[in-house]
Image (tube, rainbow, N blue to C red):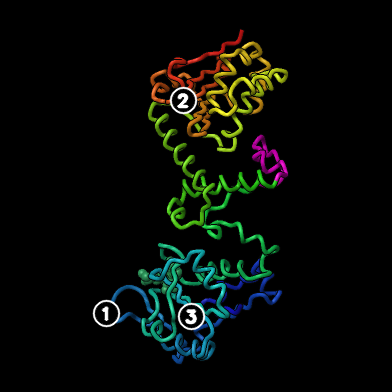
Amino acid sequence: MKIKVFTLFPDMLRPTLNASILGRAIAAGLLEVELVNIRDYTQDKHRRTDDYPFGGGAGMVMSAQPIVDAFAARCPDPFCGRRIYLSPRGRRLDQGIVEELAREEELALLCGHYEGVDQRALDAVIDEELSIGDYVLTGGELGALVLIDAVSRLIPGVLGSEDSSEDESFTTGLLEYPQYTRPADFRGMTVPEPLLGGNHADITAWRREQSLSATLDRRPELLDTAPLTDGDRAMLARLKRARTVSAQLGQCGVDCACRELRLADLWPKQWFSAFVPEARRKEAKKQCFPGRRHVGWLWQAFSMGFAQAESGDAAWEMWRAELGSDCCLYLPDDGLLFDIRDASALTRKVLEPMKHYILADPALSRTYVRPNKPDFGPYFAAARS
Ligand SMILES: C[S@@+](CC[C@H](N)C(=O)[O-])C[C@H]1O[C@@H](n2cnc3c(N)ncnc32)[C@H](O)[C@@H]1O
């Protein structure tokens, strides 16, 4: 791809064009950037390129003549591409526009300065105006660099591997998941477990949940147009419900954090394996109606005595190590798991409106289950002997 940049300040662009990925792309001939100094085309004997605005007002305006003549000399018709003026009045640049531009053979970018450019130059040589955001820069050069950088990433061969741009924010219609590199433990801050396991399906599922979650929190409007699968939509419904429940608990003074959906899905199994001794699991599963909701079979595991007897310190320690947290509230109907930071705020009054829940509180060595059968009573507590 060829890009011509029309500017009064070519030196502002050179260092960036010579560095890093852009520098390598240009050196490898994948991208050709030509800097055209508009001043070289002025017919003014003092080499001026700007003048006072008609009608008065602050600042200077870039004159039409040097710009129109520079374009005529360096971008003669027919021009096989798009001629763009970087301007705060333009269409706001986004990944969709970047993808369109990357398909062009050639781009010509006009950088304004001072108060802007004589409208007649824009009418004569520009196809469209693009803005890089709702703020005003001193000149179009930084905008041109932003555009060149974003477009060049999509040129085959510019990035190390062609995959590198496929998963990125906006390319998928969503924001990107968090990234980590070595070491796995940086000053006590660890890397999420699925990324270390090497299981591709787990990694993909974890990344998708993180992408959906970040997009929901930061740029929810992107979800209206993002290509979503049925699985994504189901996950989003749970993530939205998690935010509603967190807010409701927060209003009742309960400090809580929603755990990843992946962990919520594992929770009943982890609880079961921590509290039901291995020798009795098979029988427990058979007798505790495994086809029913988790709250049902956890309830059965308690009430039929599979879990109670062995719920000693070792079971709680194992459970804590598995989950890495203290008090947990599990909502089986929504498939949500919350870390409760201050369990004392979780009073009966707060819990009462919840149809089904399991509250596991290692501080008290208790699990409370509110089952789906009202005559089972509101609470069940399995106390350590
Ligand atoms: C100080 S600005 C002129 C602003 C102009 N008087 C206005 O209010 O729209 C000078 C130049 O910076 C560039 N520029 C400023 N903000 C920009 C933005 N958000 N996106 C792209 N280019 C911008 C344009 O090329 C513009 O001609």
Residue type, mark 1 in image: Gly
Considering only order in the chain, which callout, 1 or 2, is on the residue closer to the N terminus?
A: 1
Q: CA distance from mark 2 to mark 1?
A: 72 Å
User: Quick one: label 2 or label 3, which is nearer the N terminus?
Assistant: 3
- The numbered mark at residue 55 is 1
Query: Which quadrant, please, contains the C terminus?
Result: top right
Crowd tier of the residue under label 2, counting other residues whose Cα lies within 10 Å: few below 14, some 14–19, many 20 or above: many
Label 1 SS: loop
> Distance of mark 3 from mark 1, alpha carbons?
28 Å
Q: Which mark is residue 83?
A: 3
Instruction: Indicate the amino acid at tag 2.
Output: His
The residue segment tinted magenta is: 180-199
User: In what element is the residue under mark 3?
Assistant: strand
Indicate yes or no: mark 1 CB to ligand 1 under 8 Å: no
Image quarter hosting the N terminus: bottom right
In this image, 306 relative to 332: left or right?
Answer: right
**Residue that protrudes farthest toward the top in the picture:** 385
Asked if disc 2 is less than 8 Å from ligand 1, the answer is no
Q: Is residue 284 left or right of residue 372?
A: right
The residue drawn where x is 56% and y is 74% is: 103
Q: Nearer the viewer, residue 343 or 314?
A: 314
Q: Is residue 41 magenta?
A: no
The amino acid beneath tag 3 is Arg
Q: Residues within 10 Å of mark 1 (few under 14, many from 20)?
A: few
Q: Is residue 197 magenta?
A: yes
Residue 356, numbered label: 2
